Image (cartoon, rainbow, N blue to C red):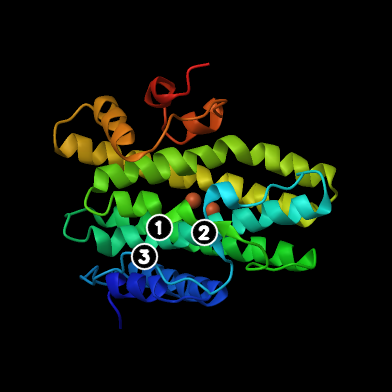
Amino acid sequence: MLTLSEMAVDVLTTADGREKTAKSRAYAAQWFAARAAGAPLPVGRAAPPLRPSRPDRPELLDPREVPKRKPGSPQGRIALLHAVAHIELNAVDLHWDIIPRFSHVDMPIGYYDDWVKAADEESKHFNLMCDCLEELGSFYGALPAHAGMWRAAEDTVDDLQGRLAVVPMVLEARGLDVTPGMIEIFRKGGVPSAVAALETIYAEEVGHVAYGSKWFHFLCGRHNQDPIVVFHALVRKYFHGPLKPPFNEEKRAEAGLPPDFYWPLADKL
Ligand SMILES: [Fe+2]
Ligand SMILES: [Fe+2]
């Protein structure tokens, strides 16, 4: 039986997307079965790679070189699903990476429950996006993708509070802002499977932002720090550029992210 950290490294070092997510889901099931049986698996220690393994395709391009397509066209809808699939695959790796990367930090077991659940959900999201792409005659890997997605992880390899601030509380919170607009695009385009998949993603991402906020506040409490001051300092240190309004204040609030966290970091209008 592998430790949780060994499972995480196995997912991170698996290149193929469908194979990565199948392992991710199977390991999550093992973790929760052991928890339910009252015999939790050890977290253990294992060295995560600096960058996760990825398939040969998609080709990874600088964000400025990724071609833009009209969102209203069939090709535009495929490009949008492809971009979301790529984000979801990165998210699978991000949620597994946080476990072995910071296993030297003593955390309550609920912290591991949360990230294993998030990784399992991201795996489901990736598969849903792949299914939608295939239904539209495409597949993950058919188009180039954004190369910069792992940067936030590399920038915060030795700072757990920085990782929580930038990944769930900035990047995943941004997902809450933009997903309703994407759902509208597929509703207008008459692609009900994509509408349903994005609605699942939208509902579950609230939880991931909430886990980030919960454990960020936990660590601030442990170190007797003011969470807002520390959050602003870490986002300015690790996130490159201002946050972009409009913000989904309602969903952000539901996820434990009050306006005084993000508004002071926003683009000045
Ligand atoms: Fe997701
Ligand atoms: Fe997520």
Q: What residue would you read off at disc 3?
A: 51
Q: Which numbered mark, 2 or 3, is in the foreground of this view? A: 3
Q: What residue would you read off at disc 2?
A: 122
Q: CA distance from mark 2 to mark 3?
A: 18 Å
Q: What residue would you read off at disc 1?
A: 94
Q: Is residue 246 above or below residue 155?
A: above
Q: Is mark 2 within 8 Å of ligand 1?
A: yes
Q: Secondary structure at mark 3?
A: loop
Q: Secondary structure at mark 1?
A: helix
Callout 2: few (<14), some (14-19), or many (20+) C-alpha neighbours within 10 Å? many
Pointer 2 and pointer 1: residues touching (CB < 8 Å)? yes
Residue 101 place in picture, x, y as percent: 26, 61
The N terminus, quarter of image? bottom left
Q: Is mark 3 within 8 Å of ligand 2?
A: no
Residue 163 place in picture, x, y as percent: 31, 47
Q: CA distance from mark 2 to mark 1?
A: 10 Å
> Mark 2 vs mark 1: which is more N-terminal?
1
Callout 1: few (<14), some (14-19), or many (20+) C-alpha neighbours within 10 Å? many
- Residue kind at label 3, given as amino acid type: Arg
> Mark 1 vs mark 3: which is more N-terminal?
3
Between residue 115 and residue 130, name the one nearer to us: 130
